[in-house]
Image (tube, grey):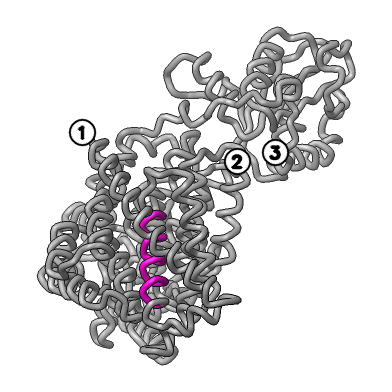
Amino acid sequence: MTRAFIIRPFGAKGGVNFDAVDEKLIQAALAQIGVSGSTTTEIVEQGNIREDMFRLLVCADLVIADISIHNANVFYELGIRHGMRPNATFLLRANIDEYPFDLRTDRYLSYDQNDPASSVPALARALKATLDSSRVDSPVYQVLPNLKAPDATSLHAVPGDFREEVQRAWEAGERGDLRLLAHEARNFDWASEGLRAVGRAQFSLNSNAGARETFEWLRELRPNDIEADQRLASIYQRLGDVTRSGQAIQRVIASSQTDRRERARAFALHGHNVKTRWRESFGDKSGEEARKAALGASGLKEALQWYMDAFSQDLNHTYPGLSALELLCIRNELAKAMPAVWTDQFDSDDEAARELSASLAQFEQIASAIQLSLKAGRESLLPQPAPEIEDTAWLEVFEADLALLTATRPGAVAQRYRDALTDQPASVFDSVSDRLDIFRQLEVRTDFATAALATLAELRAAQPALAKPAEPPVRVLLFTGHMVDDPGRAEPRFPPTKAAEDKVREMLRTAIAAEQALSDGKIVGVCGGACGGDILFHEVCAELDVPTRLYLALPRERFCVTSVQHAGPDWVERYYRLCTRLVPRILAESEELPKWLRGKQGYGIWQRTNLWMLYNALALHGKELTLIALWDSGDGDGPGGTDDLVFQVRLRGYKLLRLPAEELKSLA
């Protein structure tokens, strides 16, 4: 969420009621463009207000300064902003005082102090244009164009307990939980660094849909964030969107903030995109046909050049050097095996021979450089008290990759991969397997690639967690619905009668069967465990051979007290049978939110549970998502009810199938 910080006088001064101007003009204009904004008076946490003010002046996406009168605090804070941020500072004033000389060249908006609301449309347009523009509005940065603004992220202290939640979700591989944490982090002033922490965890888990969403949110907050663009370039690659990947890469290359290492990574990512297109040119071929197509395709030379350029940018960045060496190996071996195909690419046999000789020499040079790069990388490793959420296995993997290209005994290569890949995550296996498969398909260093692939297969078989993931479901059915009425409820909604229960069971059976008829593959249900609609959903799905997953806001016994027990002993028995059949996932130990989340207004455990289930349903990567809602179209009895989950699903554009709960009233 975009945030504004407002610098202004308080109370009535100089004939202007600045509190009224804030309410009727500034807040109204911000609301029109969907931006939240406040002053230091709205900081409710204990602490040094000056520290909070400095942080907000540096970190706010937009600062609005009312310079109507000669107020020392306003000009002091405006000076700090102009000195720390080159843009996104907007001035406004009532025409009641002489304008300070040093600001007379700046643009500003004038308003009528007696009718500030009349300027709302103009201010909204101006603020939107300011946010959308990269124009330097700070006089400091205008006259000192080479001055580099400080990194605002140093002031974004991500709460330790938030980082711990991210760590737990990453270690458990809970992709849906990470998406929930990213969603929640957006509401805080440390949002950018919170999103970065979640996005790195998602990237490591190959949770591509979630990671894309998280880093796109980060880019909304920080449009020039180099890491966000680097990650998105890779994520778009994984998702097959080469066009958007290329656009992200170009943003990195064009940025004045990109250093040599980041530029090297960008060049390597572009090389990977070119390599992907090269592989597609022979992907459906085999044998001699594939080898001829691979050697003759222009993408081979282009990808090689991009990788070489990346390695030359940063010789300590081993990946592009190895990628270049792999392509050199393939090109050299294919050229020697198919001289006619090779020489046809040149004007003369002598030119073809010189190029091959140069390519063979280049292979030896790059191999030596990579050996030095790996040695430097090994020597730079230091013990880390708290490892980052990143893959740390790549150094040994790269050493095995180099052995694939240079070793003389296939058995030694197989052993190097065995040492490098033992106890590593599936994402590392998948990357290595993909690289080895090119050699297998093109019959280059076949004995070495075959031995390495056999080792990978052996390690996968010994570690069930490394098995290829099951195909995602075709459709995910997310359920929400009313509980059985509390005995003291005035107006029936789900009466505690057999007739009402039978009616709901019939509705569910019809709806789930209809969803089955629309799907040719696997369906999975996601649901809570409350008495009434939730338990019935699980029971009907079991009857129709639809597997379900059980999500509870609280531990089993506590959840029973809050959401099952009031309906009577029969529902309690069914609830515990369900918990025995399906091991439930538990969101929290109590109804109190984590400390880092308690400052979020109007948010509690039940709204959080709805989002938690929704994001875990999305994390199953089904092609379709349907929310089945046993709902009377009314408001819930409290926050986080059926209507809340319906709203969240509608907001995201997914399918809603409403079961008319109002028909149950007559069955009381």
Viewer-nearest of discs 2 and 3: 2
Q: CA distance from mark 2 to mark 3?
A: 10 Å
* Most foreground residue, 435 or 339: 339
Q: Give residue 329's position: percent from left, percent from top.
A: 36, 67
- Quadrant location of the N terminus in the rendered image: top right
The residue pinned by badge 3 equals: 30
* Most foreground residue, 314 or 51: 314
The relative height of residue 246 versus residue 118 in the rendered view (above or below) is below
**Label pair 1/3, CB-CB below 8 angstroms:** no
Residue, x 10% and y 70% (percent of image)? 462
- Quadrant location of the C terminus in the rendered image: bottom left
**Which structural element holds mark 1?**
loop
Q: Amino acid at mark 2?
A: Thr
**Which structural element holds mark 3?**
helix
The residue pinned by badge 1 equals: 385
Q: Amino acid at mark 1?
A: Pro
Task: Specify the label residue 2 is tagged with.
Answer: 2
Viewer-nearest of discs 2 and 1: 1
Q: Give residue 69's position: percent from left, percent from top.
A: 80, 12
Q: CA distance from mark 2 to mark 1?
A: 35 Å
Q: Give residue 472's position: percent from left, percent from top.
A: 34, 76
Residue 559 located within the stretch drawn in magenta: no
**Which structural element holds mark 2?**
loop
Q: Give residue 657's position: percent from left, percent from top.
A: 48, 77
- Please say whether residue 83 is visible from this viewpoint: yes
**Label pair 2/1, CB-CB below 8 angstroms:** no
Q: Amino acid at mark 3?
A: Leu
Q: Earlier in the sequence, mark 2 or mark 1?
A: 2
Residue, x 55% and y 25% (percent of image)? 150
Q: Earlier in the sequence, mark 1 or mark 3?
A: 3
The magenta segment is 320-334
